[in-house]
Image (cartoon, rainbow, N blue to C red):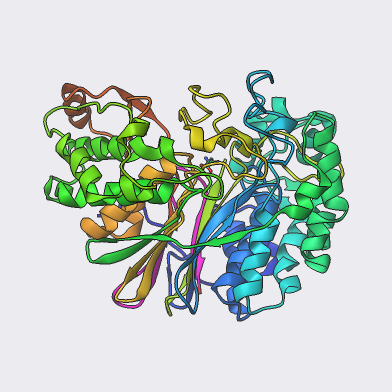
Amino acid sequence: MNFHRIITSSLLAPCLVLFSLRAHAVPAEGHKIMISAPNHYAVEVGQRIAQQGGNVIDVAVAVGLSLAVTAPYYASLGGGGFALVKMNGPVEALDFREVAPRGANKEYFQNLPAGSSMNGAHAVAVPGFPAGLFELHQKYGKMKWELLFTDAVAMADKGFAVTGGWVNATENEKDRFDPAGLAAFFKKDAVSYKPGEVLKQPGLTKALMLLQRQKLKGFYQGEVAKDIVDSVAAGGSKITLEDFKAYKVRWLKPLTTEYEGHKIYLMPPPSSGGVVILSALNMLEKLDVKSKPLLGADEYHLIGEIEARAFRGRVLLGDPDFHKNPIQFLTSQDYLESMRKSVNLKKTVAVKAIAEDEIKESAETTHFSVMDTEGHAIALTVTLNGTYGSGVVSHKFGVALNNEMDDFTTKPGEPNMYRLTQGAGNMVEPGKRPLSSMSPTLVEKSGKVVMSLGAPGGPRIISGVLQVLYRTLARGMDVDSAVQAPRVHHQFSPNILFIDRQKFAPEVLTELRNRGHKIDEGWMGKVYAIRLRNDGVLEAAFDSRGEGGAGGI
Ligand code: DON
């Protein structure tokens, strides 16, 4: 089955072509290193680094930097993220998520106007993106750090032709920008760029060069940190230079589970993704969903019911340095069995919200994947949270800043921008990381990584990664077909089955409604995935729900 296929030439684009707008024509198969990323610039930069002898990490760092230039609405030096990495040792998880300023606390948003955790200076948390890329390179990079910046700096300095996706994202956020944002991303008098026109970013060029030459000091302890602190201080933020100095990444142990003869490595808290996906995979297998007709009402009904139950415990999670996460309880066979038993094939059954005393235990984002045929792999998801994050852009260096504070429980009982109602363990505390849904994921077979995937999309990341794992590993679909296949999303609250817009057959919809589902047609997460086939060829796909590129050498 093939819903979508990219055809292509595997020749590397010469430099002149690199910065111009053109139709995607990149290979979806590779024999050495493969990249799946949210735009063609990123893929071409990655190909060039691979061609120069860079390893998977060198490619990933250069891809990340190029996205900070070409897609700053979701990948900016002012954001943060997670990565799952497999190089020469065991699979590890890197957390470079943004942290709350030390001057913030549980009451921080109680007395601020509605929307303060989404828009403007209060929404900004201390960025982790530069520290994450640097840590990856320090530990595993092969090429010189400085060389990985060549394309990103050139695209910021000489400019690159903006894509339709860039114009769409930027235009939609116009009203949220202050004069610095308008100056960075619009022409004189706030006139919009058109697709194909060239955007230069002189401030960002300097910020990148400081990071290139002075490494982390150039971002966290110098002029750039000062510019960001000054820019948000004007809007009342509590972020200080000390917060920047204190920022640290952390290595975590991934969660693991067996699924359909594979070992799945998942992101642990402060991501909720790993716990939810692990529980859902268990229920998919035990309820034998793969025996139902492909893409039919039974299959989608069960996936929706399973997702709702897997999401039920999300409310109990938070940053592990501040909160005890009941992972053992939520992933125990007893708990999962009780959830499985409440599923009925013929009708939707709402389970009640999880209560604290039920626990029996002691005590706008983007993703890219890079993988080689040797089994080295990285799955890396970065975010500013919303498109262009807080809407605040640092005044001198033009760095778009996140609104990750909205991922905390800012006002108990009130849903956040993704309609997630969150728990007490996720309240704002000084130096704490907000709970996330980002789910970079690696899959191993007989000790070798055979798949790397992830997505943007808030909680819909989780349902996207889950369904691509199910479709490839349990239903035998190729990676591209699995990514494009119609999806459902249920996050427990609200009790709605969200489905892909215009992708469902009317009779499947009627069947789902007959079983009691309240249905809402809309958007889904955009999955980027690479798989090593049994014949040794790397196969990559990007989601046709958005822009992207897949290519390699
Ligand atoms: O960490 C999280 O869960 C969110 N900040 C992710 C936001 C996201 O995926 C936006 N993409 N469309």
Residue at image location 65% in from the left, 66% down from the top: 135
Magenta residues, start to end: 530-552
Confirm whether the magenta stretch covers residue 223: no
Q: Is residue 513 above or below residue 215?
A: above
Confirm whether the magenta stretch covers residue 538: yes
In the displayed structure image, the side of residue 394 where residue 114 appears, left or right: left
Residue at image location 63% in from the left, 36% down from the top: 405
Residue 89 vs residue 402, the one in the foreground: 89
Residue 72 locus on image (x, y percent): 67, 46
In the displayed structure image, the side of residue 440 where residue 350 appears, left or right: left
Residue 413 vs residue 259, the one in the foreground: 413
Q: Quadrant of residue 209?
A: bottom right
Residue 349 locus on image (x, y percent): 20, 27
Quarter holding the N terminus?
bottom left
Residue 488 visible to the viewer: yes
Residue 3 visible to the viewer: no
Q: How many marks?
A: 0
Q: Is residue 108 above or below residue 138?
A: above
Residue at image location 28% in from the left, 58% down from the top: 472
Residue at image location 68% in from the left, 19% down from the top: 111
Residue found farthest to the front: 362
